[in-house]
Amino acid sequence: MALLEVIALDVADARAAGDGGADRLAVIADMAADGLTPDPVVVARIRQVTSLPLRVMLRANAGFRTTAPELDRLRRVADTLKDAGADGFVFGFLDSLEHVDMGAVGKLAEVVAPLPWTFHRAVDHAANPAFAWRTVKELPGVDAILTAGSARGVDSGVDVLVRRAAEAGDSARLLMAGGGLRRKHVALLAAAGVGSFHIGCAARPEGAWETPVSARLVREWRTLVAAATRH
């Protein structure tokens, strides 16, 4: 079944994404830092206006590494975010060698369980993205891997995404295409078996984070994804 996930920064975004037919919201703060953990108060307000599933970011800085104090704060806020209405999370970290930080990720996975979670685009920035992909697939509780196939975005990584979707096992099911996703990519990825798509600025007029989500744009993406994934 196809899934369209839309980034929501606030209540207005959540309402518009829902009106446009989004299947799930990625609730995030501070896109200038490429997405950080939102205030639980914002998550609670969003929960009041939508019944859509909420995947909430757990990330304390603009990089893909975390420190022990940051990780402790994220573990504590995860429980608060659950109470605020989160029914899933988004996180992922690399260590000093740019490999998947199994210690940090494992600790957060334990805290958020039994809720599902998405490993975000840190996988594209790993020293060996192919190895990182295989590693992340085996992590407990992960049910989506947000990836562009390249640190430079889907334009550069679309061929990688097609190859990964064709791998044996549940690769196509786990793969969520996002990170500079454009309309022209959808049919190609859907034909390869990808059914999950993630958009952020593409749901906003002029592609600007300063403008709110447009229900019209989300509806256009919903129609595109539904048509491409129809079998």
Image (tube, rainbow, N blue to C red):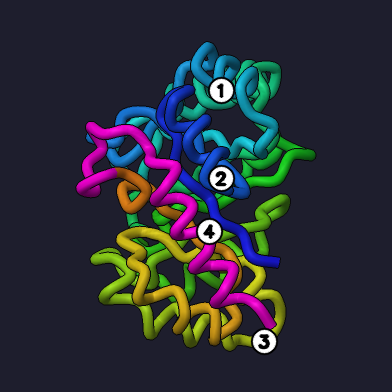
Residue type at the position of mark 3: Ala
Front-most of residues 24 and 55: 24
**Disc 1 or 2, which lies upstream in sequence?**
1
- Mark 2 belongs to which amino acid? Val
Cα distance, mark 1 to mark 3? 38 Å
Q: According to the image, label 2 marks what residue?
A: 105
Mark 3 or 2: the one toward you: 3
Q: Which mark is residue 222?
A: 4
Most frequent secondary structure within the magenta stretch: helix
Q: Nearer the viewer, residue 212 or 111?
A: 212
**Residue at 26 percent of width and 76 percent of height:** 156
* Residue drawn 45% across the image and 74% down it: 186
Q: Is residue 67 visible?
A: no
Residues rendered magenta in the picture: 205-231
Q: Nearer the viewer, residue 3 or 78?
A: 3
Name the residue located 35 percent from the left edge and 59 percent from the top edge. 179
Q: At which x and y percent is residue 164?
A: 52, 81
Question: How busy is the neighbourhood of tag 4: few (under 14 within 10 Å), some, or many (20 plus)?
Answer: many
Q: Which mark is residue 46?
A: 1
Q: CA distance from mark 4 to mark 1?
A: 21 Å
Q: Is residue 78 toward the left or the right of residue 156 in the image?
A: right
Mark 1 burial class by Cα count in 10 Å: few <14, some 14-19, many 20+: many
x and y, in percent, of residue 176 in the image: 53, 63
Query: The N terminus appears in which quarter of the rendering?
Result: bottom right
Please tell me which of labels 3 and 2 falls first in the chain. 2
Mark in the foreground, 4 or 3: 4
Closest to the observer: 112 or 230? 230
Report helix, strand or loop for mark 2: helix
In front: mark 1 or mark 3?
1
Q: Which residue is mark 3?
A: 168
Q: Do the residues under discs 1 and 2 have CB atoms within 8 angstroms?
A: no
Q: Do we see residue 113 in this rendering?
A: yes
